[in-house]
Amino acid sequence: MNESTYSFARVKAVLAKEFIQMRRDRLTFAMMVGIPIVQLLLFGYAINTDPRHLPTLVEMGDSGPATRAVVQAMQTSGYFDVQGTATAGEADEALGSGKAVFVLTVPPNFERDLARGEMPQLMLDVDASDPVAAGAGAGAMPGIVQQALKPFAKTEAPAVETVIHRRFNPAARTAVNIVPGLLGIILTMTMVLMTAVALTRETERGTLETLLTSPAQPLEVMLGKITPYIFVGFVQVMVMLAGARFLFAVPFSGNPLAFAAAVSLFILVNLSIGFFFSTIARTQMQAMQMTFFMFLPSILLSGFMFPFYGMPGWAQVIGQVLPTTHFIRAVRGVMLKGAGFGEVWGNLWPLSIILLVVATLALLRYRRTLD
Amino acid sequence: MNPLGPRENVIDVQGLTKKFGAKTVVDGFSMQVPKGAIYGFLGPNGSGKTTTIRMMCGLLRPDGGGGTALGYDIITQSREIKARVGYMTQRFSLYEDLTVTENLAFVARLHDLDDAKRVIDEALQEYELAPRANQLAGQLSGGWKQRMALAAASLHQPQLLLLDEPTAGVDPKARRDFWEHIRGRADAGVTVLVSTHYMDEAVQCDFITFIAYGKKLIDAPSADIPRAVGLHTLRIEGPNLHEVYRQLKGARGVDQVARFGSSLHVSGRDKSALDRAVAPYRERPGMDVLAAKTGLEEAFIYLMGGAEDNFK
């Protein structure tokens, strides 16, 4: 027996026990191994603050060799992904709903005016709600135009003016973009976590038995447990909106009803995700870990922190499955771009599908846990 | 509305079977509990007591068998049963972060009781919980927690109480008090099914069912159990009993040796074989071999040992 004050054997005893427990707790183990790998992949591959190939539409007021040369040059520059032509109305809607980041307007008689040296204007409308995403393309545009039109010019520098029109966030303030996104992130975090933990707590502490042995129906229990958190979610939204308005002067230019619809849907989606997690997790700790797994991609791949179109295809696919992605688009649309139901609809239906799928899974699993 | 006739059994189940995966936890369990009885439910840990209780009140769907509780079908009418049964779970299942009154009020509302306030006040009086009414449940001692749980399970005046090891980990004084409350319920006409590991509690039951490894081994009025098991018992007193214990354990004619305080109880089914096995110790200086009555405890230890041999 070793009675000296410190013994390495005792340290080793604790150490060995710790490793055994680490290995048994699969979720913690998955977190320790998974999080570095996921972070590495996301930050290394998915995140690109200088995004290229952003969706672009062209409003053709004229056509001809010079116009084609400009469009061609935009495409080869890598900043733009010219997806087709559009009328003025269509182009506006595409910008508002986020389907296009750039719209190039070629004025009528552009070819003629250019040939005569009458300084025609090419206008590039930019969705500047995310200043980071659109900044590089917008900055490079004048140079691209100059380069493309050189062969058509009589003088050394082509007589053309490139007008950059930053829409929705003319001052390019990042707060304007971040604050509405933060709404999505905070709701994701708190709603999923609170429901998952609140329901798992009943299992962990054994109080679920009281509910099961009572005549209360599963649906009654579910409604009673979830309703308070819907309320909490709306309070959070109110606080955030007030902060956005009075601290950061973020505009709110769209339809409040469309906003309310998106918020309600998103809160429900997150509550059912939390409910789903609670049917899998046996302890509150596990529920927290699962929430974290969900939270990480929601921050990185939803377009909240980094431009969505800057990510490679696979990351965009993952992003499309995340409810936060659609919610952030809807909220930015309403607050910054003045969107109404028409523009937001494209984000509401994916949220509805996610809600339907997750809620069904959760209820199916919940029934099984009863037995 | 109670479909139960006056002379019918409160619980009447046949052939209850439950499997979890490949493991059969309860195997062909049948039981009849008459109205107003205190029925003891005994068996080693993991013998399927809790699973059986849960099947009997409609919480778990049996894989085989069926029957009625309070006249309702345990498979198709679990809601009717839940509304009329008071079930006290093995693990404390009320809210530690609510006060005693809040817990009782919550349970009363779950049962949608009309006069909840009066019912709660009466329960606080009857179970002497009034002085602790505003304490958090988590701050109560084990005995008081269980008393509150019994009060909660009785709020809706159930005709049948299912108590799953209600006194596990409770000190002897609190256990006695708790049993007095069970008696009180039974005197009021409530049928009680109670699982326990304590022999002093088993003795208080009118009937006892003993199950092990999912099978029922015995089911009889508690006074008849020692005789039904068919054991003869001798008591040995004297020095070095541990050595005697080791020699007698497994000896011919000895089915069981159990230590009771400062004496050994040696039991066997064959009286003459038992006498022969014990004979050498009668001669030892300072050692006494005396006739003894087979008690419930010997009977159960014997049943448990036999069950292990049969099933392992």
Image (spheres, coloured by chain):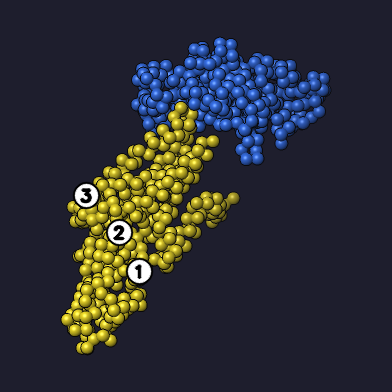
Chain colours: A yellow, B blue
Q: Are marks 2 and 1 in contact (CB under 8 Å)?
A: no
- For the question of whether residue B71 can be seen, the reply is yes
Residue type of the residue flagged with mark 1: Gln
Query: In the rendered image, which residue does mark 2 sit on?
Result: A97
- Res A40 label: none
Q: Nearer the viewer, residue B152 or A107?
A: A107
Amino acid type, mark 2: Ser
Which mark is first along the chain, 1 or 3? Answer: 1
Split into 4 quadrants, where in the image is the C terminus of chain B?
top right
In the displayed structure, would residue B175 be above or below residue A257? above
Which label was assigned to residue A83?
A: 1
Residue B94 in the image, given as x and y percentages of width and height: 44, 30
Which callout, 2 or 3, points at the residue further toward the start of the chain?
2
Q: Nearer the viewer, mark 2 or mark 3?
A: 2
Look at the numbered discs 2 and 3 and tell me whether their residues touch, using CB distance below 8 Å: no
Q: Chain of mark 3?
A: A
Q: Residue at x 47, y 41 (%)?
A: A363
Q: Position of residue B289 (x, y in %)?
A: 75, 20
**Residue B180 can be seen, yes or no:** no
Q: Do the residues at discs 2 and 1 belong to one chain?
A: yes
Q: Residue at x 20, y 65 (%)?
A: A171
Q: CA distance from mark 2 to mark 3?
A: 24 Å
B264 on left or right of A219: right
Which label's residue is closer to the chain start, 2 or 1? Answer: 1
Q: Residue A101, percent across and down?
A: 30, 66
B33 is higher (above) or lower (below) than A318: above
Q: The residue under label 3 is which amino acid type?
A: Ala
Residue beneath disc 3:
A242
The residue shown at (21%, 68%) is A165
Check disc 3 and report its element: helix, strand or loop. helix
